[in-house]
Image: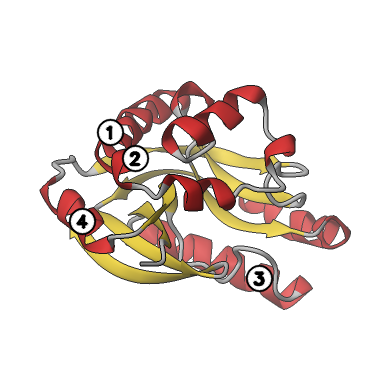
Amino acid sequence: MTAVPMFVALQPDRELTQFLNDCKSRTQEMVGDQLYLGDPPHLTLYLAAFENPERVIDELSILTLPTITGELVGWHVFEADVLTGRNTLVCEIDAADKGKLRQVQAALIRRLAPLRDVSATLERYKGKLNNLSKERQKAVERVGFPFVGDDWQPHFSVGSILPKDWPPVWNELESLSPKRAFSCPQLKLYRLEGTHPVLVNTFDL
């Protein structure tokens, strides 16, 4: 059986989803297709390749999590993103709320990392490992995902923008800096077809 790349994500509330979709649409109108721009708004918790997606669904269905709440404090830019080489524009989450999200990620990884196809998951980062710190390389080997624990910066992305297209995007969106409360009432499981996420299942929190 071929391993399926999948990721688990938190679905933001209606207001934040609308805000992110508006930012995505403005960016699309200015500079056309960009990486992640067409993705539905979400906060990625964990990504790996799995031979048995049904087992992943089973584990998520019995995972007990509270509704996630927090505060956005503005924009953050991952300049020359280590995985894309582009500028990735994201909503920055308050530091105290990041701690709560890291606990959620840890609980998720304890359940799902043992189910991953180790070789297929490692293959996803082939050619990119040299761009990652030693700590992140070890995380890929240990749990299959480079960003874990205190090193993980949970965020909601607008998109990952080519450097040549970045100036007009930032000029347009900088003043819309998101500072608001948010909640995440659902957990969602997606499979990846290339770089395109396809919804597999939704779990209410």
- In the rendered structure, are the residues bearing label 1 and label 2 in contact, judged by CB atoms less than 8 Å apart? yes
Numbered circles on residues, count: 4
Residue at image x 77%, y 72%?
A: 31
Element carrying mark 3: helix
Please name which of the two marks, 4 or 3, marks the residue nearer to the observer: 4
In the rendered image, which quarter is residue 75 located in?
top right
The amino acid at mark 1 is Arg
Element carrying mark 2: helix
| Location of mark 1 (residue) | 110
The amino acid at mark 3 is Arg
| Location of mark 2 (residue) | 113
| Location of mark 4 (residue) | 55
Query: Gap in Å between the C-alphas at discs 4 and 3?
Result: 39 Å
The amino acid at mark 2 is Ala
Side (left or right) of 34 relative to 180: right
Residue at image x 48%, y 22%?
A: 150
Dot placed on the residue nearer the N-terminal end, 4 or 3: 3
Circle 1 residues within 10 Å: few <14, some 14–19, many ≥20: few
- In the rendered structure, are the residues bearing label 1 and label 3 in contact, judged by CB atoms less than 8 Å apart? no
- In the rendered structure, are the residues bearing label 2 and label 4 in contact, judged by CB atoms less than 8 Å apart? no
Q: In the image, residue 32 lies at what x, y percent?
A: 74, 76
Vertical arrangement, residue 21 with respect to residue 45, above or below: below
Q: In the image, residue 88 lies at what x, y percent?
A: 67, 50
Query: Gap in Å between the C-alphas at discs 1 and 3?
Result: 38 Å
Query: Gap in Å between the C-alphas at discs 1 and 2?
Result: 6 Å
Residue 147 visible somewhere in the drawing: no
Query: Gap in Å between the C-alphas at discs 2 and 4?
Result: 12 Å
